[in-house]
């Protein structure tokens, strides 16, 4: 496959996550009132999706190591399209949550395989740059998702916004079916044997490089998810923005993230992975502390939230490509399993945060502000301790038993 095709594949597979979560966010308040549901149920349409997304990767990873990335992608993307159609026509909130769980499980196949493909084709350092390019494409998709969702829900309704996800999934499925070539050089016939699987997971979880980078990716995604899950209720419900204006807010956040991924590619050749992460953590902590202080000082307006979050999201464009590729780097023979565990940990944090937000969103900006501040502090501590000490993606010693 040509480098351009690989980047396009990574863009679509990684981009399926933000379009699935971001596109329906502007319609979430209308969806909630349309079903007569409460806020906790509304949050469940997102947190249940992400929990299924995280858990499913534990199964998709070993399956892709055994049978290859291509068949898993074909199966997962087909299920995604079916679930997207089911979500769009769900007659009740309960069925919508069920279809979103199926959609999340199917989405797990795409994102897990994308991270594993990077390790199949690249060395750890080159993988960070390739992942950054793919995440730039993800950022472009995220830029378009919220404005498109707001437009579709304003002009039509929330069901059309959810149906648009089926169109995206069908496009990704067509590309994989027609152009993607298997990236696994040698499939592992023992990948699904229970004893081998447990040994593989234990070896991965004991690796200090995996622990350091997975902690970073988990904390970084936890902060992003806090913003995603709470932003529509805060910006629309508390600060009074329209759905279209909220879509523009999300567009600006995604654009800042894209700029962060470009910055990442400039930092890596000069400073390497560990120092790049440490530098970005300065911005993360600055944004997190600023949003908390401004909220505590009573400055509850759009810019008091956006400006600190811009700092956080800009640095997120460095933390995610470095941490996701770094966590999988030591395991060329078990990239699927390592990718699955890394994704599971991220989604576990998101699910826990979603449950907390569902019970703490109180019509103020404080849950959003304090949540972002908490994760920012965690990111800085991880970047300046664990990643600095153990975050060498060139370490491959642990790959020998796998």
Image: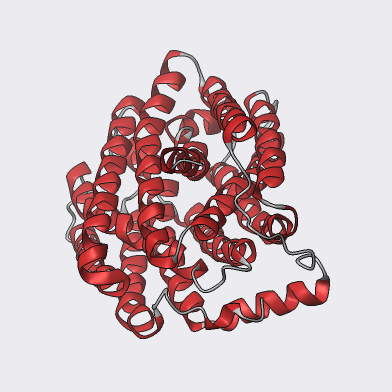
Q: Nearer the viewer, residue 19 or 43?
A: 19
Q: Nearer the viewer, residue 237 or 17?
A: 17
Q: Is residue 363 visible?
A: no
> How many numbered marks appear?
0
Q: Nearer the viewer, residue 333 or 343?
A: 333
Q: Is residue 132 visible?
A: yes
* Figure check: 147 above or below 231: above
Q: Say which residue appears at 54% left-offset and 50% top-offset.
A: 114
Q: Nearer the viewer, residue 130 or 148?
A: 130
* Figure check: 301 above or below 64: above
Q: How is the image coloured?
A: secondary structure
Q: Say which residue appears at 41% left-offset and 54% top-offset.
A: 131
Q: Is residue 237 left or right of residue 6?
A: left
* Figure check: 317 above or below 148: below
Residue 38: x and y in percent read: 56, 41
Image quarter (top left, top right, bottom left or bottom right) of the C terminus? bottom right
Q: Quadrant of residue 335?
A: bottom right
* Figure check: 248 above or below 345: above
Residue 211: x and y in percent read: 49, 77
Q: Say which residue appears at 25% left-offset and 53% top-offset.
A: 314
Q: Say which residue appears at 31% left-offset and 42% top-offset.
A: 254
Residue 366: x and y in percent read: 32, 57
Residue 302: x and y in percent read: 22, 42
């Amino acid at each position: 496959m040509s480098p351009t095709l690989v980047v396009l594949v990574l863009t679509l597979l990684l981009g399926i996550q933000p379009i699935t979560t971001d596109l329906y966010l502007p319609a979430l308040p209308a969806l909630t009132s349309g079903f007569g549901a409460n806020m906790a149920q509304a949050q469940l349409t997102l947190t249940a999706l992400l929990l299924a997304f995280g858990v499913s990767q534990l199964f998709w990873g070993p399956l892709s190591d055994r049978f290859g990335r291509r068949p898993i992608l074909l199966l997962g993307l087909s299920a995604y399209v079916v679930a997207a159609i089911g979500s769009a026509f769900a007659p009740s909130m309960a069925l919508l949550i069920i279809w979103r769980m199926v959609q999340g499980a199917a989405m797990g196949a795409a994102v897990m395989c994308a991270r594993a493909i990077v390790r199949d084709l690249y060395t750890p350092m080159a993988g960070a740059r390739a992942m950054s390019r793919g995440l730039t494409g993800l950022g472009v998709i995220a830029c378009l998702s919220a404005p498109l969702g707001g437009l579709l829900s304003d002009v039509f309704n929330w069901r059309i916004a959810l149906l648009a996800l089926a169109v995206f999934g069908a496009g990704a499925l067509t590309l994989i079916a027609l152009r993607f070539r298997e990236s696994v050089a040698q499939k592992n016939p023992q990948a699904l044997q229970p004893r081998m699987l447990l040994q593989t997971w234990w070896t991965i979880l004991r690796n200090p490089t995996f622990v350091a980078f997975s902690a970073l990716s988990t904390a970084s995604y936890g902060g992003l998810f806090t913003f995603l899950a709470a932003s529509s209720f805060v910006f629309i419900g508390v600060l009074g923005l329209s759905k279209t204006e909220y879509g523009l807010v999300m567009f600006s956040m995604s654009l800042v993230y894209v700029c962060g991924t470009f910055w990442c590619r400039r930092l890596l050749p000069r400073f390497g992975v560990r120092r790049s992460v440490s530098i970005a953590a300065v911005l993360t902590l600055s944004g997190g502390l600023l949003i908390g202080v401004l909220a505590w000082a009573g400055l509850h307006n759009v810019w008091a939230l956006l400006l600190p979050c811009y700092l956080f999201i800009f640095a997120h464009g460095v933390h995610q490509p470095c941490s996701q590729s770094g966590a999988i780097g030591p395991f060329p023979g078990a990239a699927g399993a390592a990718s699955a565990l890394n994704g599971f940990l991220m989604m576990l944090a998101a699910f826990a945060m979603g449950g907390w937000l569902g019970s703490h969103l109180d019509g103020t900006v404080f849950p959003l502000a304090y949540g972002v501040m908490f994760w920012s502090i965690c990111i800085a501590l991880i970047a300046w301790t664990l990643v600095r000490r153990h975050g060498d993606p060139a370490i491959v010693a642990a790959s020998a038993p796998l």
